[in-house]
Amino acid sequence: MTGVEIAAIVVALGVAVFVGVLVPVLIEIKKTVTESGRLLAQMNTELPSLLKEIRETTQNLNQLAEYTRDGVEHAAVFFHAVGEVGETVQNVHDTVRGRNGAWLRNVAGLVAGFKAASSVVKARMSHGEGGQSNGG
């Protein structure tokens, strides 16, 4: 055997090993491409419905956020009104119990005095209209 024949055999063996390794790799690549095609086809059919559901969910969340915002605004108005009522009750309480309570007690005393005077006048008038007086 000559050097050229040996080189030819080595090259032939190299090509055979290369083809022996390359063929299984090419078969795996073909399987991968086939699976990728199936996956893309499946995504192509499912993606529009998935996007539609995502859009509907987003709209529902936006509407829920709007309802929540309205509810919070109504609650804020309600709590503000409750606060105002609380302040009014506090002012009345302060008036009755505090410095202004003396004024309220004076008015109550004045009303009681008028009631007492009117009951005395009524009693005298019912015992004999303008009749005798105790003094003489």
Image (tube, grey):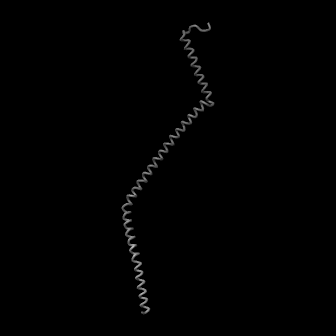
The x and y percentages for residue 101 are 61, 29
Q: Quadrant of residue 114?
A: top right
Q: Residue at x 56, y 8 (%)?
A: 131
- Left or right of 32 in this view: 118: right
- Left or right of 81 in this view: 25: left
The x and y percentages for residue 15 are 41, 83
> Which quadrant holds the N terminus?
bottom left
Residue 136 position (above or below residue 54) = above
The x and y percentages for residue 89 are 56, 34
* Circle count: 0
Residue 65 position (above or below residue 114) = below
Foreground pick, 54 / 42? 42
The x and y percentages for residue 56 are 40, 53
> Which quadrant holds the C terminus?
top right
Q: Residue at x 43, y 93 (%)?
A: 2
Q: Residue at x 36, y 61 (%)?
A: 45
Foreground pick, 46 / 100? 46
Foreground pick, 56 / 23? 23
Residue 93 position (above or below residue 68) = above
Q: Residue at x 42, y 51 (%)?
A: 60
Return the residue found at the far bottom: 2
Return the residue found at the far top: 136
- Left or right of 109 in this view: 35: left
